[in-house]
Structure formats: structure tokens, C-alpha cells
């Protein structure tokens, strides 16, 4: 009987330890991951703003590392916010460069007389 109680207690402690070991994801971190995933799959951003996409990835890694190291929630939220904003910057820079290229191509097609 004591062996059964001991095994049951050990099982309960193991289950509780598993629950304590997992930390729910910070909502800001979830948003940062989603934003980065969307931007990193955007061919316009990847082609026209690779440096900004890389910076967004690095910012996301810092936020994820803070979460994994159990840094306080406010810090994880802040780092996640920065990662989200960096991903948004990458998307906007990519779109801006795409628009500039389209304008330049249109100007070449029209020629100098087309600007009069």
C-alpha cells in the first residue's frame, strides 16, 4: 500500500513539475512571431529589404530568448513589441522599394519626353 502511495505521489509531483516548467507564451511574443512569419514569407520584403528582415529575425530571437530565460513579463513584452515593429518596418521598406522600382521603370518606358 505504501509503495502505491509513493508511486502515486511521485507521479503527481512529476505532473506538477511539468506544469510549473512550462510558461505560457506572452501575447506580445505570439504577435511578434506571427508578424515575422508573415513578413519572412513575403517575397517583396525578402527581395527588397533583406537587412530589415534579418533585423526582425534577430529581434524575435532576443524576445524568445528572454521568454525562455524567464525574464520578467514586461521585458519580454517590450522585446516582442520591438520585434513586431522591426518586422513591420521590413515589410514597409520592401513595399517602398518595390514602388520606387515601379516608378523608375515607368519613367524609363515613357522616356524624357513623357515628363513634360
Image (cartoon, rainbow, N blue to C red):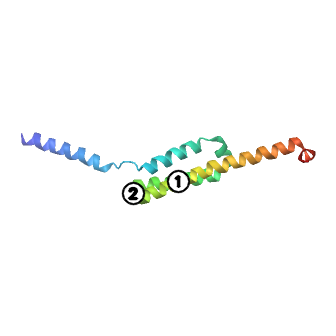
Question: Which secondary structure, mark 1?
Answer: helix
Q: Relative to residue 78, is residue 45 drawn left or right?
A: right
56 lies left or right of 74: right
Residue 114 screen position, x and y as percent: 90, 44
Mark 2: few/some/many CA within 10 Å (<14, 14-19, 20+): some
Identified at 43% across, 56% down, the residue is: 76
Q: Which residue appears at 65% of the width and 41% of the height? A: 43
User: Residue at 54% across / 47% down in the picture?
Assistant: 36
- Residue at image mark 2: 73
Q: Secondary structure at mark 2?
A: helix
* Residue furthest out toward the right: 113
| Image vertical order of residue 59 relative to residue 106, above or below | below
Label 1 sits on residue: 83
Q: Quadrant of the N terminus?
A: top left
Q: Nearer the viewer, residue 113 or 14?
A: 113
Q: Residue 96, percent across and down? A: 70, 49
Quote the CA–CA distance across marks 1 and 2: 15 Å
Q: 10 Å neighbourhood of mark 1: few (<14), some, or many (≥20)?
A: many
x then y, percent, for residue 104: 81, 47
The one nearer the camera, 91 or 113, is 113
Left or right of 62 on screen, residue 100: right
Q: Is residue 108 visible?
A: yes
Residue at image coords 45%, 51%? 28
Q: Earlier in the sequence, mark 1 or mark 2?
A: 2
Q: Which percent across, then down, holds residue 46?
A: 64, 45
Taking the image as drawn, is residue 49 in sight?
A: no
Q: Are marks 1 and 2 in contact (CB under 8 Å)?
A: no
Q: Residue furthest left?
A: 1
Amino acid at each position: 500500500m505504501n509503495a502505491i502511495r509513493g508511486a502515486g505521489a511521485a507521479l503527481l509531483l512529476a505532473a506538477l513539475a511539468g506544469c510549473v516548467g512550462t510558461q505560457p507564451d506572452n501575447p506580445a511574443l505570439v504577435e511578434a512571431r506571427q508578424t515575422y512569419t508573415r513578413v519572412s514569407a513575403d517575397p517583396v520584403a525578402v527581395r527588397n529589404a533583406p537587412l530589415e528582415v534579418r533585423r526582425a529575425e534577430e529581434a524575435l530571437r532576443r524576445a524568445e530568448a528572454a521568454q525562455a530565460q524567464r525574464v520578467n513579463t514586461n521585458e519580454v513584452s517590450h522585446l516582442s513589441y520591438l520585434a513586431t515593429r522591426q518586422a513591420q518596418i521590413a515589410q514597409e521598406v520592401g513595399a517602398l522599394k518595390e514602388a520606387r522600382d515601379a516608378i523608375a521603370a515607368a519613367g524609363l518606358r515613357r522616356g524624357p519626353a513623357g515628363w513634360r
